[in-house]
Image (cartoon, grey):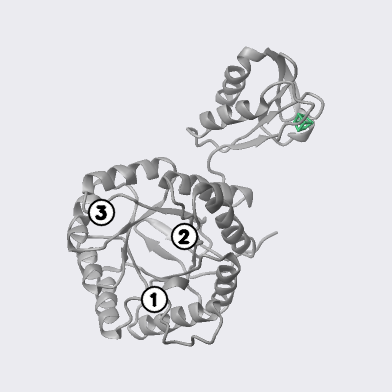
Amino acid sequence: MMRRRASRPIKIGDVTIGGGAPIVVQSMTKTDTRDARATTAQIRELAECGCQIVRIAVPDKEAAQAIPDIKRGASIPIIADIHFDHRLALLALEGGVDGIRINPGNISDPEQIKKIVLAAREREVPIRIGVNAGSLSPAKGAEKPVAERMVDAAMEQIKLLKSLDFELIKVSLKAFDVPTTIEANSAIARKMPYPLHLGITEAGTPRTGVIRSAVGIGTLLYMGIGDTIRVSLSGDPRQEVVAGYEILKSLELSQRGPTLISCPSCGRAEVDIIALAEAVEERLAKMDKPIKVAVMGCVVNGPGEARDADVGIACGKGRGVIFRKGEQVRTVEEKDFIQALMAEVEAL
Ligand code: SF4
C-alpha cells in the first residue's frame, strides 16, 4: 500500500495540488502562443481528454499579450512558462494567468525574482520553481552530482521566495535521465513541504517517451512522491494526457477512463486479436467511464485471465464469448465482435 507524502496544498485556478488531493494531469500547448485562437483550440482539445491544467510558453511580449484572450477561451487553469525575461512573467500575471513557472537556471537575479514574487503575491498566484538538469548554472557546484545540484538550485530559490513571505510554491526537478530525476525528487521531497510536479524532460517520441516517463514518474509516484504530472512527448499533446492517466491508472491513483486488458496473442489465437484490441482501444478512447474491458484471444484462458474485467470478449474460431466479471453471458459471430462488445460496454 503506497503512502503519499504530505505536501502543502496550493491552488492553480480552481484545481488543488498537493495536500492529499488527487494527482493532477497537466500538459503543455504546442501552438504559437501569439495565435490565441489556435492556442485556445488546443487547450479545448486537451481539456476534452482530461487535461486539468495547461502550461503555455511565453517567449516574447506578443505571446504575453495574447494571454487575456487565451484565458477567456480556456476552461482549465493556465500556467505561463517563463524563461530569461522576468518582465514576461509580470505581463503574464497582469494578463490573468493562474500560475507562473520560472526556471532558476535562467532567471537568477534576485531583484528580478523579487519583482515576479511581489506581483504573484498580490494576486495570490502560485509559482513553480522548475529546475531542468540541462539549464543548471555551470558556475555552481559543478563537481557535485547533477541530482544534488538540481536540489540545491531549487532550495536556493525556495529560500528567496520564503524570504519574501511567499509560500504558494510548487517545485519540479526534471532531467532527461530517469535515475537522476528519481534521485533529485526523492531528495527534495525530504527537504521541503511544497507540492512536487513530476516529469521526465525531453522524454522523446510517444514510442519511447511514454516508457521513460512511465518508469520515472511511476517510480516516484509509487514511492508516494508527486502531486501533479506531465508526460512530455514529441507528439500530439493529447497523447501526453492519455499517457498521464495510464500511469495513474496503472498505480490505481486515478479512476478516469476505461482500462483495456488485452492478451498479447499467441499460437492458440484463431482471430486477429491485435487488430481487434486496437479497434476496441480506439472506441474506448472516446469514453471517460472508469471500466475495465478485456479482449482475449481464446476461450481457454480468456475469461479466467481477465476475471477482474467488467466486460470482455474471448475469441475462438469464427465465434466469441462475451463475458462479464469473468462469467460467460453469450456467444457472438466474428463479424459482430466489436459491435457486441461495445454494446455491453454501453450497457454498463
Ligand atoms: Fe494465447 Fe489465449 Fe493467452 Fe491470448 S488468451 S495469449 S490467445 S493463451
Type of amino acid at the residue the image marks with label 2? Glu
Type of amino acid at the residue the image marks with label 3? Thr
Instruction: Find the residue positioned furthest to the right.
Output: 300
| Contact between labelled residues 2 and 1, with CB atoms less than 8 Å apart | no
Q: Is residue 118 left or right of residue 225?
A: left
Q: Residue at x 25, y 52 (%)?
A: 71
Q: Quadrant of the C terminus?
A: top right
Toward which corner of the image does residue 180 lie, by quadrant? bottom right
Label count reads: 3
Marking on residue 167:
1
Q: How would you rate the neighbour count of disc 3 (Cα within 10 Å): few for under 14, some for 14-19, many for 20 or more?
A: many
Q: Position of residue 232 (x, y in %)?
A: 46, 55
Report which residue position mark 3 lands on.
33
Helix, strand or loop under label 2: loop
For marks 1 and 3 on the same chain, the one whose residue lies earlier in the sequence: 3
* 1 or 3: mark nearer the eye: 3
* 1 or 2: mark nearer the eye: 2
Report which residue position mark 2 lands on.
202
Helix, strand or loop under label 1: loop
Q: Is residue 229 visible?
A: yes
Question: Gap between marks 1 and 2, in whole Å?
Answer: 29 Å
Q: How would you rate the neighbour count of disc 1 (Cα within 10 Å): few for under 14, some for 14-19, many for 20 or more?
A: some
Q: Is residue 202 left or right of residue 97?
A: right
For marks 1 and 2 on the same chain, the one whose residue lies earlier in the sequence: 1
Type of amino acid at the residue the image marks with label 1? Glu
Q: Position of residue 263 (x, y in %)?
A: 71, 34
